[in-house]
Image: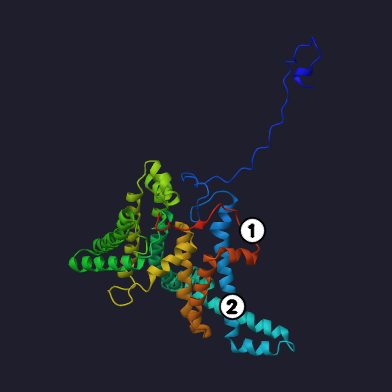
Amino acid sequence: MAEDERPPGRAPSTDPVEVAEPAPPEPEEAPPEGVPPPEPGGPVQGLIPETGRWSFRRSLLVPMLAIVTALSIGAIIIIVSNSEALAAWSSFFSDPLAAFRLSGRAVADAYRALFTGALGNPRLIVDAIRGGDLHQVALTFYPLSETVVTATPLIFAGLSVALGFRAGLFNIGAEGQITMGALVGVVAGFSFAGLPGPVHLALIVIAGFVGGAAWGAIPGILKARTGAHDLATAVAVAWLLNRTTVGFEFRAVGANPPAARAAGMSPTRTYVLVMSLAGGLAGLAAATQLASVSPSLERGFSSGIGFDAIALALLGRATPGGVVAASFLFAVLRVGARSMQAATDIPVDLITVIQALVIVFVAAPALVRAIYRIRARRVIGQEVFTKGWSG
């Protein structure tokens, strides 16, 4: 009954009236700690680590499925390149089991040779350890040591690109930074040849870092001062990004430069510092090459490591741990390819195909989700890796 319709002489009721409250809105996933929220309608950074149930799917599940898919396609290539398997498939209807048996054997032999050639034979390793012969133990671990040596420069180069990604920069100059780090490292090595071995090695590593950092600072200055586009050690990097004020500034500027500037941060200083550190990491890749695999500066010194670094950063979702895992994957494929070719006559070019497929599937996560029917997270606006010309 409305207030003006109350019976005469009756006082208004003072009892509390229950009012139905609207249902609370659906909670949205909060951005990671220390990262400013995205601008309304603006892009959502694809390489910023997420929290909750989506973190696993986006940072681990999709890349793993990309690797499985690439290996599966590689298995098909192995089958069609195996004469016995093809002959069995030509008479499939008369003996279908033979076709599957020979195909499975061809794939198993190839991948067994690939992984044992890169990681060692587990049975031989166990037998050598039980026997106690140190020389035999060293021989059984030799494939793994070769993989570690191959993975080390890949890790440094991948971290170089990943560090730029986290600050909204696309460091495509890692190859040049590696070359410059190698040049400075060579000069330092020849100029101080009389030093003790450990000191000499440390000097080469430091010189490689400084050379790469100086070369990497150039595009950082151009980006900060003129708006030019970017086309112009894992634990330490993880600690830097996630446990320090400088790392917080990197992530904040990469997520939203205007908001970071409003909070008192300097995108200009951040760009220069990020590219300097990225160049220094690439220089460390050069220093490790000089100190181990290629003790002289010659044509093909870096073997395209700087360009592989872009793929490693993408595959590792621009996280230090992901880059390390991706680097070891590429190292396993490269080191094991020689053993696979020797054991099965399968050309090492197959490894190049598998690496390319991994990159394709990682760069197109929507395709992987469609293949395995994984529902994608709803995002607002466009998902991007780095900032464009306008920052």
- Please give the count of numbered marks on the rendered protein: 2
Please give the name of the residue rendered at 63% of the width and 79% of the height, measured from the top-left corner: 104
Q: Is residue 34 visible?
A: yes
Q: Nearer the viewer, residue 346 or 148?
A: 346
Q: Is residue 327 visible?
A: no
Question: Does 180 sit above or below residue 227?
Answer: below
Q: Would residue 107 appear left or right of 199 to someone viewing this image?
A: right
x, y (%) of residue 132?
46, 69
Q: Earlier in the sequence, mark 2 or mark 1?
A: 2
Q: Amino acid at mark 2?
A: Ala
x, y (%) of residue 46?
50, 56
Question: Does 350 sit above or below residue 66?
Answer: below
Q: Mark 1 — residue?
A: 375
Please give the name of the residue rendered at 21% of the width and 67% of the height, measured from the top-left corner: 187
Q: Assign a secondary structure to mark 2.
A: helix
Please give the name of the residue rendered at 64% of the width and 43% of the height, measured from the top-left corner: 26
Q: Quadrant of residue 209?
A: bottom left
Label disc, if present, on residue 235 of the rendered structure: none
- The quadrant the C terminus occupies is bottom left
Question: Does 171 sit above or below residue 5?
Answer: below
x, y (%) of residue 51?
55, 49
- The quadrant the N terminus occupies is top right
Q: Mark 2 — residue?
A: 75
Q: Quadrant of residue 171?
A: bottom left
Q: Nearer the viewer, residue 57 or 338?
A: 57
Q: Assign a secondary structure to mark 1.
A: loop
Spatial CA span between label 2 and label 1? 27 Å
